[in-house]
Image (tube, rainbow, N blue to C red):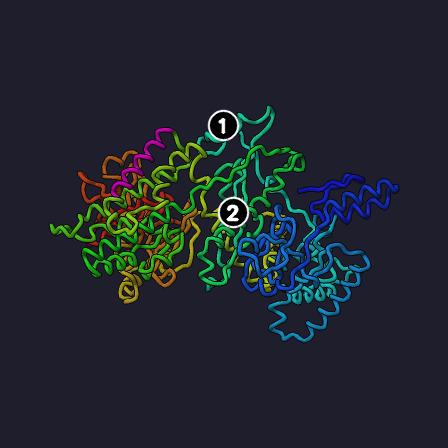
C-alpha cells in the first residue's frame, strides 16, 4: 500500500514513514497546511489499550496473534503481538475470565521497554550512541565462538525502528567496490566482525584518499534495506500467443473477463502457503506464504525466481494436547489464517486500486471486483500413491508373508542409477519417512518392482499377481496424462477414462484393507474434480507445488540458521531481501552450454604397439567390473571391424603412432553425461543408450520407432598422427526378446546379445533407463515411465 504526501505528492511505502514525512514537510508550508498535516498524521496513529499485568502468565500458552499495524507477521515472539481485530471496542477488565476464543481477539500494545514508534532526530542520535556503547561493551565480553555465531545476527534484532522507516530509497550501490563487498558478505553469510576486518584491510592497503567502502558492515546492511527491489514483472516479456494449457484460456478466465469494464484486464494472483520445519528435530516451524501471477506463462511461472515470498503466517501453538484437539483451538487457527489473508490482500481492495509497474511505467491500474484463492491440487498424487504403496505391502504381507516384502526391498536396492532418479539403498521399509521427490521416484520404478512378484497359486487367499502390476500400470498411464502441458477436449476425456479405470481396480484390490473403506478426500478429488479443474483453470502443471517446496530451503531453513533466534521472521525477511538485491545487482552470467565430447577423468592410456599386453593385464585385474573386462576383451576385435568398414586395416597402423585414451565419461551433444566406469561414487555405472538407426537400415532390425538400444562398456578417444581423433564407444547391443510380443507393460522387452561394436559417440541419441527383470537373468525392460 502506498501513501501520497498532500504537500509534495511524494509516495511513501509505510504509515510510519508517511507520518514522519508529513510532519517534516508541513513545516515548509503555512499554518493551514500544517494543521491539515496533523489531521492526516492522526489518521494513522496507532492507539492500543494498556497492556494487562497478567500478560506474562498468558504468554506461557505460546499463542501467537496477528497485528493490523505490523507489516511483518511474528510467529513466536516473546513479546505478545497484536491481533487483527475490528469488532472489539474495549479491553475486558479481567484477563483470567476470558475464554480461549476471547483471549485471541484482544489487541495489545507493545511492551513498555520498546522504543517509541516515532523518534526525533535528537532522540534517535542519543539512542544510537547508547546502543553503540552498550553493544561495544557486550562484545568485549564475548568469547571468540560466541562472537562468530551471533555477531552477524544480533544487530538484526537490535536495529532501531528509524532504520526501517527510511523515507528515501537507494537505486543502487554507490560504486562497484561497495557492491562487490556486500555481495561477498551476503553470498558467504559473513558476520559483521569478518566484514569489518575486510574493510580495515582494504582501507589500509588501497592507498586511496577516500574509502570506497562503508564505515562498517552494519551501515552497508542498512543501505541495502533502503534499496528498491526490481519488480518481478520486469523480468517477464509479454506473450500474445495463447496455448490451451494456460490459465488465461480456461473457462474461469473467460467468464471473469466478461464481467470487466471495457479496456480493463484481468490479473490472476496465486497464493501458496504450507508450514515447513526449520530444524532437523522438527520442533520449530515457520509458515511462509508465496505469491505468483497466473498471467505469466506456465513454464516460466514454474521457475523458482517467479515466486515471491510475502510473509510468514502466525503458527498457533497449544499448551497441551487437550487444548490442541479442542474446537476453540481449531476455530482460532481458522480465524487467524483467514484474517492473515485478509491483511495480506487488503491493499488489493483499496477504493482507488493499485498501480502495477512494468519497465518503469504504469502497466495496470487495478480495481479488485472479486478475488478468489482456489484450493488446487496439493500432493493429490503423492497422497494417493502413498496409500497404494501401503496397501500393496499390507496385501502382499497378509497373503504371502514377509519373504515377499524382503524381495521387494531387494529389488528396490538393485534398480540401476539414472539421472534425476533417487536411489533406495535401504529399500522403503519406512514409507512415512520418504520425501516428495523419493515418492515420485518410486512412481517411475514400482511397476518393475512388483513385476511377477509372486505367482497365483490357485488358492482363494491369493490375488492374481497381474492385478497388482496392472494397478501400477494404470496409475502410470493416468499420471503421465495428468502431467500434460497442452490439452484438447479429447485429451481431457481420455484422462477421465484413465482415472476411472485406475480407481475401479484400486478400489477392488484395496478396499477391504482400508479402515475407512477408501473414503479419502484425495481419491474423491482425483476422480471427480481433476478434469473439471483442467477445464476451469488450465493444466495442472500450472499449479504444481514442487517448486514451492524447493523454496522452503532458501526461504525458511537456510535463513533460519543465520538468525540468532530472536524476532526470527524480521531477520529472515531482511536476509532474503538482501540476497535478492545482490542477485539483481550482480551481472547475470549466461549459462554455459555443455560442450559435446568433453571427457571426464582419464582411466587408462596405451598405444597400439603394446595394446595386447596392456589389455590382458587389465583383464586380470580382480577389481575390474565384468562389463569393463568384457569391453577390453572385445576391444581390438571391434577396432579392426570398425577400421575395416572404412577400408582400413589395424595392421596398417602398427608402424605409426595410435594412442588409445579410455575415459570414465563424456558429455553428449544434448548435455547428458554418458558413463562407463568401475567406480562412480564408489559404485560401477555403465550407461544404457538409444541409437537412432539410419533410414536404409531401419527395416533390418526390430526397433522401437527406429531406435535400437545398447549398453556402453568402454569410452575411448583414438589419436593418430595427422588425422582427426576418433571418438568412439564400445557397446553391447540389446535386441527384442520376441518380434511377436516385443512389449511388456507398454515397455520394450529386451535381451542382451553377443554383438559388440565400436560406434561414433556423436551417433548416440540419448541416455535411457533399462531395468533388469528380476525373474530372468537375460530380460530387460526399458523404463517408459519417466517424467
Residue identified by numbered label 1: 254
Q: Which of 86 and 516 lies nearest the eye of the viewer? A: 86
Residue 632 position, x and y percent, is: 28, 58
How far from the left and from the top, in percent, is residue 47? 70, 51
Residue 264 in picture, x, y percent from top left: 60, 28
The residue labelled by disc 2 is: 304
Against 29, residue 196 (above or below) is below
Q: Residue at x 74, y 64 (%)?
A: 203
Residue at mark 1 to residue at mark 2: CA–CA distance: 28 Å
Left/right of residue 85 with respect to residue 301 in the rendered view: right
Instruction: Spot the residue most to the left.
Output: 458
Looking at marks 1 and 2 on the same chain, the residue that comes earlier in the sequence is marked by 1
- In this picture, which residue range is highlighted in magenta? 489-506
Q: Nearer the viewer, residue 137 or 733?
A: 137
Residue 149: quadrant of the picture:
bottom right
User: SS for tag 2?
Assistant: helix
Left or right: residue 149 compared with residue 39? left
Amino acid at each position: 500500500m502506498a501513501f501520497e504526501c498532500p504537500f509534495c505528492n511524494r509516495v511513501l511505502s509505510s504509515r510510519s514513514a508517511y507520518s514522519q514525512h508529513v510532519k517534516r514537510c508541513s513545516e515548509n508550508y503555512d499554518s493551514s497546511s500544517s494543521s491539515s498535516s496533523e489531521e492526516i498524521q492522526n489518521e494513522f496513529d496507532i492507539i492500543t489499550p494498556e497492556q494487562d499485568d497478567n500478560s506474562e502468565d498468558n504468554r506461557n500458552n505460546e499463542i501467537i496473534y496477528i497485528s493490523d499495524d505490523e507489516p511483518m507477521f511474528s510467529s513466536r515472539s516473546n513479546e505478545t503481538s497484536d491481533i487483527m481485530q475490528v469488532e472489539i471496542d474495549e479491553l475486558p477488565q479481567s484477563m483470567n475470565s476470558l475464554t480461549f476464543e476471547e483471549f485471541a481477539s484482544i489487541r495489545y500494545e507493545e511492551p513498555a521497554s520498546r522504543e517509541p514508534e516515532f523518534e526525533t532526530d535528537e532522540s534517535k542520535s542519543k539512542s544510537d550512541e547508547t546502543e553503540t556503547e552498550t553493544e561495544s561493551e557486550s562484545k568485549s565480553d564475548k568469547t571468540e565462538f560466541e562472537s562468530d555465531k551471533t555477531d552477524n545476527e544480533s544487530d538484526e534484532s537490535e536495529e532501531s525502528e528509524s532504520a526501517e522507516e527510511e523515507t528515501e530509497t537507494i537505486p543502487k550501490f554507490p560504486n562497484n567496490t561497495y557492491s562487490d563487498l556486500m555481495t561477498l558478505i551476503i553470498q558467504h553469510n559473513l558476520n559483521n566482525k569478518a566484514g569489518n576486518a575486510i574493510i580495515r584491510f582494504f582501507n589500509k592497503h588501497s592507498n586511496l584518499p577516500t574509502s570506497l567502502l562503508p564505515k562498517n558492515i552494519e551501515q552497508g546492511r542498512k543501505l541495502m534495506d533502503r534499496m528498491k527491489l526490481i519488480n518481478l514483472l520486469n523480468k517477464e516479456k509479454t506473450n500474445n500467443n495463447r496455448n490451451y494449457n494456460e490459465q488465461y484460456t480456461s473457462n474461469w478466465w473467460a467468464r471473469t473477463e466478461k464481467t470487466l469494464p471495457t479496456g480493463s484486464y484481468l490479473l490472476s494472483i496465486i497464493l501458496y502457503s504450507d508450514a515447513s520445519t526449520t530444524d532437523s528435530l522438527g520442533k520449530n516451524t515457520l509458515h511462509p506464504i508465496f505469491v505468483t501471477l497466473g498471467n505469466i506463462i506456465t513454464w516460466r511461472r514454474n521457475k523458482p525466481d517467479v515466486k515471491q515470498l510475502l510473509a510468514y503466517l502466525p503458527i498457533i501453538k497449544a499448551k497441551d494436547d487437550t487444548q490442541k484437539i479442542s474446537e476453540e483451538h481449531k476455530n482460532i487457527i481458522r480465524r487467524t489464517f483467514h484474517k492473515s489473508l485478509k491483511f495480506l490482500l487488503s491493499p488489493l481492495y483499496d477504493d482507488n486500486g493499485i498501480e502495477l509497474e512494468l519497465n518503469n511505467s504504469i502497466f495496470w491500474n487495478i480495481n479488485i471486483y472479486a478475488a478468489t484463492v482456489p484450493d488446487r491440487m496439493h500432493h493429490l498424487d503423492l497422497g494417493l500413491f502413498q496409500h497404494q504403496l501401503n496397501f500393496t505391502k499390507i496385501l502382499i504381507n497378509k497373503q504371502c508373508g514377509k519373504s515377499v516384502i524382503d524381495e521387494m526391498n531387494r529389488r528396490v536396492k538393485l534398480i540401476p542409477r539414472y539421472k534425476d532418479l533417487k536411489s533406495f539403498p535401504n529399500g522403503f521399509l519406512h514409507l512415512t519417512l520418504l520425501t516428495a521427490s523419493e515418492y515420485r521416484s518410486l512412481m517411475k520404478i514400482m511397476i518393475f518392482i512388483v513385476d511377477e512378484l509372486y505367482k497365483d497359486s490357485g488358492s482363494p487367499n491369493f490375488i492374481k499377481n497381474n492385478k497388482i502390476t496392472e494397478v501400477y500400470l494404470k496409475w502410470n498411464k493416468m499420471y503421465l496424462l495428468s502431467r500434460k502441458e497442452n490439452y484438447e477436449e479429447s485429451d481431457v476425456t481420455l484422462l477421465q477414462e484413465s482415472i476411472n479405470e485406475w480407481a475401479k481396480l484400486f478400489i477392488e484390490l484395496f478396499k477391504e484393507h482400508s479402515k475407512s473403506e477408501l473414503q479419502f478426500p484425495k481419491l474423491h478429488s482425483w476422480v471427480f474434480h481433476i478434469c473439471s479443474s483442467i477445464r476451469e483453470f488450465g493444466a495442472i502443471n500450472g499449479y504444481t507445488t514442487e517448486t514451492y517446496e524447493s523454496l522452503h530451503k532458501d526461504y525458511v531453513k537456510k535463513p533460519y540458521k543465520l538468525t540468532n533466534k530472536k524476532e526470527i521472521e524480521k531477520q529472515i525477511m531482511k536476509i532474503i531481501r538482501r540476497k535478492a538485491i545482490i542477485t539483481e545487482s550482480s551481472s547475470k552470467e549466461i549459462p554455459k552450454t555443455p560442450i559435446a565430447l568433453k571427457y571426464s577423468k582419464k582411466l587408462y592410456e596405451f598405444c597400439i604397439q603394446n595394446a595386447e599386453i596392456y589389455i590382458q593385464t587389465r583383464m586380470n585385474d580382480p577389481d575390474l567390473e565384468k562389463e569393463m573386462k568384457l569391453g577390453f576383451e572385445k576391444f581390438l576385435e571391434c577396432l579392426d571391424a570398425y577400421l575395416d568398414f572404412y577400408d582400413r586395416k589395424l595392421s596398417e597402423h602398427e608402424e605409426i603412432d595410435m594412442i588409445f585414451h579410455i575415459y570414465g565419461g563424456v558429455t553428449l551433444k544434448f548435455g547428458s553425461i554418458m558413463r562407463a566406469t568401475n567406480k562412480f561414487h564408489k559404485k560401477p555405472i555403465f550407461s544404457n543408450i538409444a541409437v537412432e538407426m539410419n533410414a536404409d537400415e531401419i527395416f533390418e532390425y526390430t526397433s522401437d520407432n527406429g531406435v535400437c538400444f545398447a549398453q556402453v562398456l568402454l569410452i575411448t578417444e583414438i589419436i593418430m598422427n595427422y588425422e582427426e581423433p576418433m571418438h568412439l564407444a564400445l557397446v553391447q547391443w540389446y535386441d527384442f526378446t520376441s518380434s511377436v510380443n516385443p512389449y511388456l507393460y507398454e515397455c520394450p522387452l529386451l535381451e542382451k546379445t553377443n554383438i559388440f561394436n565400436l560406434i561414433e559417440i556423436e551417433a548416440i541419441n540419448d541416455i535411457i533407463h533399462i531395468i533388469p527383470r528380476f525373474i530372468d537373468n537375460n530380460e530387460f525392460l526399458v523404463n517408459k515411465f519417466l517424467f
